[in-house]
Image (cartoon, coloured by chain):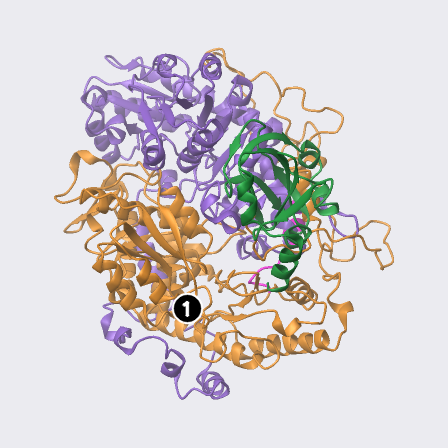
Amino acid sequence: MRYLPLTKDDRAAMLAKIGARNIDAVFRDVPQSAVVSRSAFDLPDTQGELEVERTLSRMAARNVAAGSVPFFCGAGSYRHHVPAAVDHLIQRSEFLTSYTPYQPEIAQGTLQYLFEFQTQVALLTGMEVANASLYDGSTATAEAVLMAQRVTKRYKAVLSGGLHPHYAESVETVANLSGEVVRAPVIPGHEEDLIKLIDEKTACVVVQSPDVFGLIRNLKPIADAAHAKGALLIAVVTEVVSLGLLEPPGHRGADIVAAEGQGLGVGLNFGGPYVGLFATREKFIRQMPGRLSGETVDAAGKRGFVLTLSTREQHIRREKATSNICTNSGLCCLAFTIHLSLLGEEGLTRLARLNHARACALANRLSKISHVELLTPAFFNEFTLKLPKPASPVVDVLAEKGILAGVPASRLWPHDHNLRDLLIIAVTETCSEEDCDAFAKALAEVL
Amino acid sequence: MSEIRYTDQHEWVRIDGDEATVGITKYAADQLGDVVYVELPEPGRSLGQGGEAAVVESVKAASEVYAPIGGEVTDANSAIAADPAKVNADPEGDAWFFKVKIADKGELGKLMTAGQYADFLKGL
Amino acid sequence: MTLNSRGRPTAPGTIEPNELPTISGDRGLDHEEPLIFELGREGVCGVDIPEVQLSEERLGGLRRRAPIGLPGLSEPEVVRHYVRLSRMNYAIDAGLYPLGSCTMKHNPRLNEKMARLPGFGDVHPLQPQQTVQGALQLISELMRWLTMLTGMPAIAMSPKAGAHGELCGLLTIRAAIEARGEKRRRILVPSSAHGTNPATAAMAGFVVDEVLATEDGHVDADALEAKLGPDVCAIMLTNPNTCGLFEPRIKEMADAVHEVGGYFYCDGANFNAIAGRVRPGDLGIDAMHINLHKTFSTPHGGGGPGAGPVVLSERLAPFAPLPLLMQDGNEFRLIEDRSALPKDAKPFGRMCAFHGQMGMFVRALTYMLSHGADGVRQASEDAVLSANYILTSLKDVMSAPYGDGPCMHEALFDDSFLEGTGIATLDFAKAMIDEGYHPMTMYFPLVVHGAMLIEPTESESKESLDRFIHVLRELTKDAKAGNRTRFEGAPRLAPRRRLDETLAARKPVLRWKRKELPQAAE
C-alpha cells in the first residue's frame, strides 16, 4: 500500500521491541468477540492511482459540470470565476496539511491569514468584529440566533419569509430546542410585514438581503423596530459578492451578520465545503461562537497572532461554551481571503457591477417573453420570474437541451403550489452573452 | 474586628458586621494563571450560599466564583473588571470581587477558618 | 470557585534577541511579512475585470456609498504575500506531527486531484438531479463504505464536522425519545471526553452528568451503571478513549444503557485505531460520527473544513435528518423535504443547507478506494503499532500513567517525570519545536496531570519514529540533568518566540484598523 511506509521487517522489529507476539497481542484490550475478519467487508482491496482515478472519473463524467453549459443556478450557491493563483496557494503543503494553530510559534501563517480574513469580513459587512469562520451560511445563521438568545435572554426568533428555507430549517433545528421560531409568510418579490411580529419576547429578527428570490431588502426600518423592542437584527447574506455594490448590513442597523462566503474563492462543490462568515458588534465579542485570531507580541517584542478569548469555546468551557464548534472552514477562509486580496477594492467593485449589469440585461430580455413576469423589482445578480407554467419541468427540458436554467422555487418549497411557476435565476460574470442568448431563445421556445 | 472565612472552592469572605466582602484566594489566583477577565454580579442581585456569583477567566481556564454566604449584593469591584491583573497582584486584598448584605450569619458555620483552610490546601 | 489544571503561564515575559540583527529584518529564508492591509495601493488590481458603466440600476436605492477599505495588489504581490505566510507554518508534509487525538496522517494528493474534477467541484447543489447522478452515486458509494466498515445500517451524511455530527446524533436520539412520548434529559459523559461532547449535549438541550475515570484510564463502568436510570437519554463515550485505550467493558455499558431505555452515542474521533478490524455496530453503539478529516485523511487545512457523517442503528435510522438519499435501480434521488418521505421516515429536521461536505466526500472515498478494506485495516494496525512502539521506547524515561498495557493509536504521558526539574509540560513541548517537531497534544485529556498525548499515525517510517524517539529521550535526559536553558524560553528557532496570550485576551485586537482613519463609518 503506497501510503504505508512500514515494511514487514519493520513491523516484526517493532513487535519484538514491544514484546508482543503479533499484532493481535497489541490489540489485546479489544474483546476477541468484537474483532472481525477481512471477509466481514464486501469491499475491494487496495488499488493503484490509475484504477482509482478511472473509477472516480467515471462518476464525475455522469455529472453536468456548470462550466460546460450555460449556467444560471443560484439560490444560496453562486458560480464565480476563481483566479488560478487561489487554488495554487491553498494547496501549498504548509496551509493544506497543517492543523488548527494551537502552537502559535509555528503557525503564524494560519493565524495571520485568519486575522486578515476577520478584518476583510468586518470591512465587507460594515461590522466591528468577525470570527475565523463557521461551517457555512446556514449554520452561521443558526449560531447567530443562539447568540441573540444569549445576549437578550429572550427566546423567540422571527424569520423572514425571504430567508432561504434550508437556512430557516437549520435555525429551527437548534433554536426550537430552547425557544420559539416564528416564520413569516413567503411573498415572492415583496417585503412581508415583519415588524408586526416583533414583540417584547423577541430575541431577534432574521432577514436575508438579497433574499432567496433575489429581492434587495431594506433593513433599516426592521432594525429600528427590533431595537425599539430590545431585539437584535440578524442580517443574512448568501451572495457575498453583492457586498461589493450594496450598502453593508452593518450600516443598516444589523447587530449580527451571518453570511455565506462561498462566492469568493471556494467554488460550487455540490454544496460543501463552504465558509460561514460571522460578524457582530464589539460589545458582543464574549458571546460570539467560533475561533478568533488576535494580535499580540512575542517575547522578543515582535508582532504575532494567537487564538484568543478561548474561554468561550468548548475545549475550555465545555457545557457552558458559546458553541460546540471545533473544526471550522480554515482552508476555505484562506481561499476567500486570497481571492478578495486579488480583487481588492477596485476588483470587487468592478466584479459586483459586472454581475449586476449582466443580471439586469438578462432580466430585461427574459421578461419580454410573453406571459413571463419579473417578480423582483430590486435585485443584485439574481431575480425571480413567474412563468406561465410550472417551472420545474421547464428546467428539466432546458437541462436536456444543455442549459442549466436556474432553480425552480418548487425545489425549495415542493409543497407550495403558489410557488410552482417561479424560477430563480442567477447571473454572474461567468455567464457570457452567448450563454444568455442561448437561454433566452430556449426559454421562449419551451414556453 | 473583622473575621475571615474560607470555602473549599477557594473563595474567602471577610465579615464586618452584617456586610461580607468576597474574593478568591491566592492559591486560586495562582492556579488560574494570569487573570484576563472578570464578570461581576449586579448590585441588588440576591445570592444563595453556594450559588454562582461571578466568573473569573485566565487564558486557559474559566471558573465560576460561588457565593460563600447568601445575601443581597451591595457592591462590585469595578476596578478588577477594568484591570483583571489586580486579581493576581493582590487577590486577598484590593482585588475583592463583591460585597453582600448577609442574610443569615448561621451560614458561616459551614466555612473554614484560616488555619483549617491552610490544612485543607496541604491535603490537595 | 471551580478550578481546573489548565492555569499555566501565558505571558512569556521579555527576552533580548541574541542574534545579530539584519538590515532588512528578514533572516535568510525567513521573511517578516506585513498584513495584507499594510501592503498595496490604490489603482492596482490582481484580477482583470472589465469596467462596466451601469446603464440602469435596480438596487432599490441601496447602493453602497462608503468605500470598503480593501487594499489593491497585483497578482505577484498577493502570491508572494501568501507564500511567505505559508513558510511560517509547520505541516504534516514537512515533518512528523504527533498531535494526539487530531490524527495528522499523510494527505494523498490523488484525493485533491479527484475533488477538483469539474464533475465534482463544479456542480451546483440545486442542479436538476438527473444532471448530478454521478455525484449522488459517489455519496451512495461512500455511505456503503462507511456503513460496511462500522457495521451500522444507516447514515446521515450532512453534518459538516465532528461536533456537528455529535449534534446530529444527539438530536436523532432526542427525536427517538420524544417519539416514544418520553422526556429524558440526562446524558452521561466521562470526565475524559473531548470538550465538544458536553458542549454538544448542552446545545441539544441535555443535562450533562459527568462520569469519572478509573485509575487505569478507563471509564468507570460501575459508576456509570450506578448513574443509569429512567431519566437517562444516552451515554456519550469515546472509544478508543481519549487516553488512547480501548474500553474493554464497552459492550456491558451498551447493554446497561439499553436496559434502561437509553441510547449509546459514541464519539468516533478515534475510529482510525480500529477501522477494518472492529465494527462499532457490534459493540452496541446507536450513533457515532466519523471525522472524515481524521480517519479518512481529508486534509485539516489549518482548522477545517471537515466532515462528520453519523452512522445510526436500526432504532435511530428513521429519525435521521434531511436530506435523504434513495436509490431506485440505477437512479439516485435526493429527498429534501417532508412532502415526499419514504414510509417510516421521521426526520428530526435539517442540519444545514444542501447535502453535506461533497468536497470531503470525494477525498474520503478516494482514500478508501486506494486503501481497500485490507489497506484500511493495515493502516489501523500500523497506527496502533507505531503508538505502542513509541510508548515502549519512551516509558522508561517519560512517565506513562497507563503504560503497563498496550495502548491503541496514541500514547499518553504525564508530567511526573519532570517533577523537581522546574520544567513544565509546556516548556518540554516548546523545546520540541527547536528540534524541528510539532509538539504533541498538551494538557489533554484533563484526567492526567500535565498530559502529553502522542499520536504518530501510520504515516511514519520506522526510521522517522526512531529519530523522534531519540530526540525525546535526549530531551528528557537534559531536563532531568537540570539543563533548563533548552526549555526555558523555547522555542528559539521558530518564526516567533513565545507569544503573549495574556495580552491578547486582556486587550483583544481582532482586526486591523487604519491608523490615520479610525473607521469613521462605524
**Residue C357 seen in the figure:** no
Q: Secondary structure at mark 1?
A: loop
Q: Looking at the image, is B70 positioned above or below residue A381?
A: below
Chain letter for the part of the structure drawn in purple: A
Q: Count up the numbered dots.
A: 1
Q: Is residue C81 magenta?
A: yes
What residue range appears in magenta? C80-94
Q: Chain of mark 1?
A: C
Residue C335, position in %: x, y? 22, 40
Q: Residue at x 67, y 52 (%)?
A: B33
Instruction: Please name whichever residue, A65 or A156, is drawn nearer the observer in this view of the structure.
Output: A156
Left or right of residue A301, residue A380 in this image: left
Q: In which image quadrant can residue B115 be found? A: bottom right
Chain letter for the part of the structure drawn in orange: C
Residue B21, position in %: x, y? 65, 38
Chain letter for the part of the structure drawn in green: B
Q: Looking at the image, is A74 positioned above or below residue A265?
A: above
Q: In which image quadrant can residue C380 be found? A: bottom left
Q: Residue at x 32, y 21 (%)?
A: A161
Q: Is residue C304 magenta?
A: no
Tell me which amino acid carries mark 1.
His
Q: Looking at the image, is C60 positioned above or below residue C356?
A: above
For mark 1, what is the residue?
C218
Residue A213, position in %: x, y? 34, 22
Left or right of residue A189, residue A320 in this image: right
Left or right of residue A421, residue A288 in this image: right
Residue A152, position in %: x, y? 47, 26
